Amino acid sequence: MTRSAFARFTRALALPVRSIIGSLLCAATVNAAPTTTKWQRATGAPSAASVAEIAERFLSAQRSSLKLERVALERIGVIRAQGAHIVRYQQLAVGIPVYGGQLALWVDHDGAVRAVIGDVRPLDTAVTVVVSRDAALARVKQLSGGASGQNPELVWWRGASDVPRLVWRVDAQTRAGAERFLVDATGVQWSKRWPLAVDVLGRVSRGGSLTSPSYEDVELEALDAGAPQHLSGWNGQVNVANYMDGGFLQGHVDYRQTLTPFLDGNFLYSPPSDPLDATDGFAQVSLYEQVTRMRHSYEALGVDFSAPSWRLLVVANMLEHGKPLDNAYFAPLDMGGSLSAPNFIGIGQGSLGDFAVDPDVAMHEFTHYVNHNAINFNQGWYWTNQYGLSPWASAIDEGVADYFACSESDDPVLGDVVLEAYGLTRRLDDTSKRCPSEVGGEPHADGELIASLGWTLREQFGRARADRLMWSATTLLSPNATLGDFGRGLELAADYLEGLGELSASDRALIDMLIMQRGLDDCDAVLDVSPAEPRNILLATGTDGVGFECGELKNQGFFQQSMFQFRATPPAGSTGMTIRVELLDGSPSHLSWSVFARRGAPIGMNDDGFLPRVEVFHHSVRNITTRGAELVIDATRLPEFDPKEEYYFTIEHQNCITTPAEVSVEYTWSESVGGAGGSGGGSGSTGGTGGVAASGGYASGGDYGDSGGHPIDWQEVDRRSSSCACAIPGGNNGSPSRSTRQIGAAAMLMALGALVRRRRRG
């Protein structure tokens, strides 16, 4: 399997706000600045009514305080969590689901509502469906090169632009793997797509090595009686079969279920003599036992597997068009055939051996399956919201999958049989990772933070309590969840256990300390920056996620933002601010990046491409190839500096290297006086000390000021300014109000007052 294809497994096994203690935010906002998940400490009194009735009564009584007057909600499930219940709701607008709009209520065992968590807001729904279901399926077939779509559903999509769009959501098994498509339903030629997959007695694997696995004879539980007997169980809910043809990237997977017991009625198949055997029964029996073990573990946590939507097909010895598959994955797709099921787990027959001999592999994928069916918070690596790319739910899913696999195995090393052979084990006893300085947007790597925290909780409090804490925190998540949201979920779960007497006050304080040590107490979509608190982050390339070399991506116009936006709150009396970004690695051949700032609201995003792009901003310095840059905002800028407003900023880049970066801010207390330089600049000028050359500020890029006054690209200025009236003197409604020439003149004025300086390094 090529690296390019391999990298597309979004949820595969992966060979490669603030604390709620104190005051909590309300669960929903109306006509406010964009927000992600909100948390509300509830005060519902205990009740003897049913859990669903308690939740309905609470929402009805608190609709005004939660600002839900114009929000319609539909209950979609109740999940048990340590004796409490999580009641989950889906937001609807004119009867149509809002994709990512979810609400969760924590109801204690005594009927008291403990918390409300969610991301729901009223939508403008004045649109008409023009594109039919069949037309949407035809469009997906055209986009995918012939793949047939599954499960078409009409939904509202907000995405990175945060502007509601009515779309058809369609899943398909394409030659790029399992993919999700969004097709505009109003007649506009707009679409979006992203990867979807994630990755009797029987003789079963118990580790060892890839080439020489150890095994144990155990009773195969919950098998369904059959004639002949097959690896089918859980009252028709699971089937294990063997690969025949096709592959994840071939648009189809063909399989067969022919394995039967020996004459004594037992499935005592020994490991094959050839570790690359793609037909062996040992792998199939091992997989049945592994997923059944995990099912029992989750049943102990209160998970109900009986609904038809939970049916599962597991295929052993997966190949990719007949060639080794060095991976394993879960996908919520029906592969068809005689064992048709809405959930699929494929376990690869790799180039070095069978991934089924390592129980961690199937148990990791099984957790993805549970998270999808019980909560459905992970919508893939390329989920976007109003802050841009948001891979955090995917990272949490990966970390939780690592944790529960290792918890069941009672071993902190994930993949000590399979991944070790590739040099890619993940150690949950490594507690070094921190947020935000060591998370870069790759879910498996970022998920290590969640998994290791879970393992530390297990070491401190034992498996039973740690499993309950981790599962309870997971049940509260939505697609817009951040790593900080998971930390808040752990705190809420710990509060509940403390109330039951299962954790002491010192235990509870220790959990807070562990969350703080990993940085999860301050790891949301927006990071606050001040002179006393600079921020260290990773600027990652995103190359691993799309399977192309960085140079190829750059040539195709690939851009990526920093994984966080930043917020600076000026002190009273300040007259200006300097945003400073320092990249700690890279050379000009590797680097191409920009800084954008906006007064009073988060940076606005455009969601029309594969990845979001910065669209709404006020100030910028762009096309930087050095390792440091500054953006100065003061009274000479339009809009001028206002100490009463918050400032948001972000980094957008095409860097061909992942590099640590430091983001800081400083304030001035008197008017700055510009130095030499100015319009045009001299040959080779850097624009003087206080001023800049021709276009060193707002929309036309700091690179011009640094290279001695190149001509302004008015077309680019117009394109960049067209969605932000604040780029135009007198504008206030977000739409352009002047001619291109007038916009250009305004941009020139802002360039002259920008005070953007490049730092040169030897």
Image (tube, grey):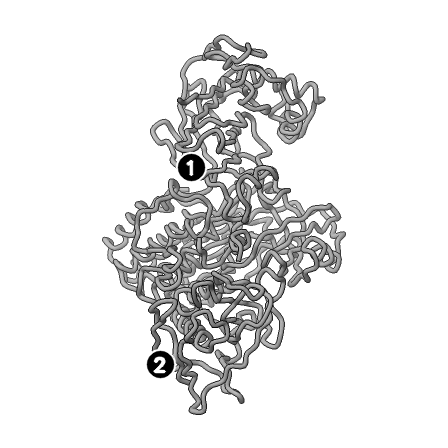
Which residue is drawn at the image coordinates 53% and 79% (left, top)? Answer: 236
Residue 332: x percent and y percent? 56, 63
Residue 89: x percent and y percent? 53, 58
Q: The disc labelled 1 sits on which kind of residue?
A: Thr
Say if 87 sits above or below 160 in the image: below
How crowded pointer 2 is (Cα within 10 Å; few <14, some 14-19, many 20+) is rated as: some
Residue 65 visible in the snapshot: no
Q: Which of 57 and 410 is in front in this view?
A: 410
Q: Mark 1 points at which residue?
A: 659
Residue 87: x percent and y percent? 48, 61
Q: Which of 194 and 6 is in front in this view?
A: 6
Under tag 1, what secondary structure? strand
**In the visual, does 498 lie left or right of 740?**
left
Nearer the N terminus, badge 2 or badge 1?
Answer: 2
Residue 102: x percent and y percent? 53, 54
Q: In which quarter of the image is residue 343?
A: bottom right
Q: Name the residue under label 2.
A: 217
